[in-house]
Image (cartoon, grey):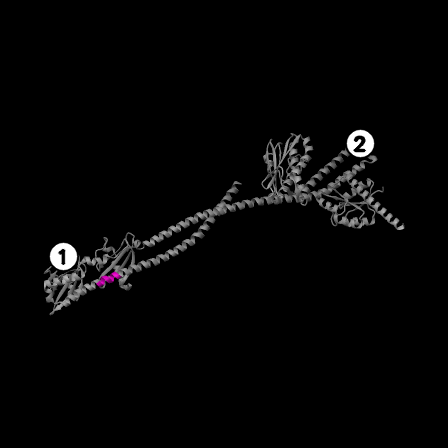
Amino acid sequence: MDQEKHTHNGYYYSLTRNMLLVIILVAVTPMIVVSSIILYQFDISYHEKVHAHLQEVILKHKNDIDSFLKQKLGDIRLLAKTFTYEELRNESFLQDRLELLQQIYGPVFVDLGVINDRGLQVTYAGPFKLGKALYSNANWFKRAMESQYFKSDVFLGLRGLPHFIIAVKENVNGDSWILRATIDFVAFNNLVENIRIGETGFAFILNRKGEFQTKPLFDLIPAKVPYNDCFKDCNVCKEGVCIMEKDDEAGNRFIYVSALLKHGEWLLVYQQKASDAFSDLRGTIRVTIAIVLLAGISIVVIAFILSRKMVSRVAEADREKEMITEQVVETGKLASVGELAAGIAHEINNPVAIMVEEAGWIEDLLEEEEFKEGENLGEFKRALGQIRSQGRRCKEITHKLLSFARKTDSRTQDVQLNELIEELVALSSQRAKYSNVEIHSNLQENLPTLHVSQTELQQVLLNLMNNALDAMEKTGGKLNVSSELEGEFIVVEVADDGPGIPEANIARIFDPFFTTKPVGKGTGLGLSICYGIVKKMGGDIEVRSTIDAGTIFRVKIPIPSDQQTAV
Amino acid sequence: MMKPLVLLVDDEVPFVETMTKRLRKRDLNVNTAFSGKEALEVLSKNQNTDVVILDVKMPGMDGIETLGEIKKSYPLSEVVMLTGHGTIESAIEGMKRGAFDYLLKPCEIDQLMLKVEEATQKKRTHEEKIREAKVKEAMSMHG
């Protein structure tokens, strides 16, 4: 039994587990798939949006810077074209020009200088004492002499401050001369420094050698910037702006947006940590994951509760089914035993009748004159009497078997239970007197009318009372019969204070042919007939017994539904 | 009183034989039959049969059917049904169809004798009344 319970529990456990898994799988899978797809699409479009924005910003600044440089070059070229070498050699004139430029453009132009073809600065206007400086070995000078004009990289030069130079070459009488202007680094730097997005986004300019042309906002080692890739990429990128994402050595992802400046000599680079650029996206992902997680947890909890509930329902239904099956089996057992009994009873009845008749015939013959003086006449008569009484016993047994099997004598009618009980008590009182038993009845008044077969109910109660009297035959005692209303049932209790029923027999007392009475006294059918009748009425019969204290039979009979409202 | 003429009908041959002997010993005229059909044949030859003792449960034509035939053709003859306990409903059915009484099998011979006598008495009284009625009719016709 324990083993069976164990495997049952195992079955329900695995049922719960399977149900749980199925519910979770079915609920969670679509949720995860859908949110993943949406998130992925969102991620892509957000990347595109951010990239497009950065591209736009960098393109604009590239144009700004290019036009700044072009404009400054144009200014100097205009100056060189407009005035003659002779005029510009005049230091005060040059000073006037510088002041005019500064007046118009602010302190972008730091100084002006006129240099002859040997690299000697002939005239100088500006805050530094650079008059007569010799530039013949300077890189910018050499380059400027080779072409019409030249914009240098940023360098420290003679003055020890970062700056860059715009130089314009002019010819006078076959000799070349150069007008040189220094562009203020700070003013130029501002153009780039203003590009700030988020917490980590900033821009700077590199030359082909990877040297900074502007002062980067953060300490930055130029070697770490993949400028070579940027230079390469920018040649193929559309509109001259290209974007790439790269991990650095520490594993942080960076976005690099780059554009070529100054005819490909300089590179404008915008750098931002990917985590910063996509911080909104990160936030969205975090919120989504939190929601998915929360939903997942609630699904698990609900699935757990739901499957537990369903399995307990299933278990309950199984238990009910088991009980019903048990009842069906019990009823079926009784019915088949009944049919068998009826068949046997019929077959036995006829031969017994013949035997009894034959014995009767012999008895008749013994009355004749010739046997009157027979020595053994008395003995013959005793033997024949015995045959007849045993025949009667057979008849009783077969008749009981037949009534056990009978199905038709159960016409229902209105029965007043208390009247029935009183009749039965009166009927049994004679027998009770001999056994020294007192019968008490304790009946509740105004009980509703029952709708059952009177004979059957009579049979049940009489059987129980007779059993009680049998039990107290030798000792005497008290027999209490009571009726009581209990919800939808009337309960009749037949209680004796006889010797009680041993524990081992309690389970079997309703089985057909089970009896503890001596051979010939009981058929073992009484209680099983009672059981069958009460069950057929839709009622129940229970027994409680204590050794040496007595036995109580409780018969529950349902009240007809039309009577229930009246109660 | 004239000895009652009884017809005993049962499919159990030994039962019929023994019972016949016992009834004859008690001063009855007894005819026997072992089936419903045979009973009707015997009755057609002995129309003055007083009482038919009829077993309910028989193969072929059963007791109830036989009873119907008897009551149709010989309404004056009384019928006592013999039955096992299980067929008590059919005995009651038989009573409704005009049987005089029923007895549970196996039965005490004295009880059976009592029933036979009562049935005979009833039949004779019945016949007497018919005769009287006939006499009255004849008298009124002559008168």
Q: Residue A15 location, x and y as percent?
A: 49, 47
Instruction: Name the residue nearer the viewer: A452 or A185.
Output: A452
> Could you tell me how far apart the alpha carbons at marks 1 and 2 are, in whole angstroms?
172 Å
Chain for disc number 1: A
- Give the secondary structure at mark 2: loop
- Give the secondary structure at mark 1: loop
Read off the magenta span: A60-67
Image side of residue A327 versus residue A42, left or right: right
Instruction: Name the residue nearer the viewer: A356 or A83.
Output: A83
Residue visible at 54% across and 46% down in the picture: A318
Chain for disc number 2: A
Q: Residue A476 location, x and y as percent?
A: 65, 30
- What amino acid is at disc 1? Arg
Q: Residue B60 location, x and y as percent?
A: 74, 50
Q: Is residue A117 above or below residue A473?
A: below
Instruction: Name the residue nearer the viewer: B122 or A51.
Output: B122
- Residue pushed farthest bottom? A173
If you read the primary sequence from the N terminus, does the residue marked by circle 1 or circle 2 appear first? 1
- What amino acid is at disc 2? Glu
Task: Assess disc 2: are there few (<14), some (14-19) or many (≥20) residues with their C-alpha within 10 Å of its C-alpha.
Answer: few
Write down the residue under mark 1: A159
Residue A375 marker: 2
Question: For residue B28, which quarter of the picture?
Answer: top right
Disc nearest the viewer among 1 and 2 = 1
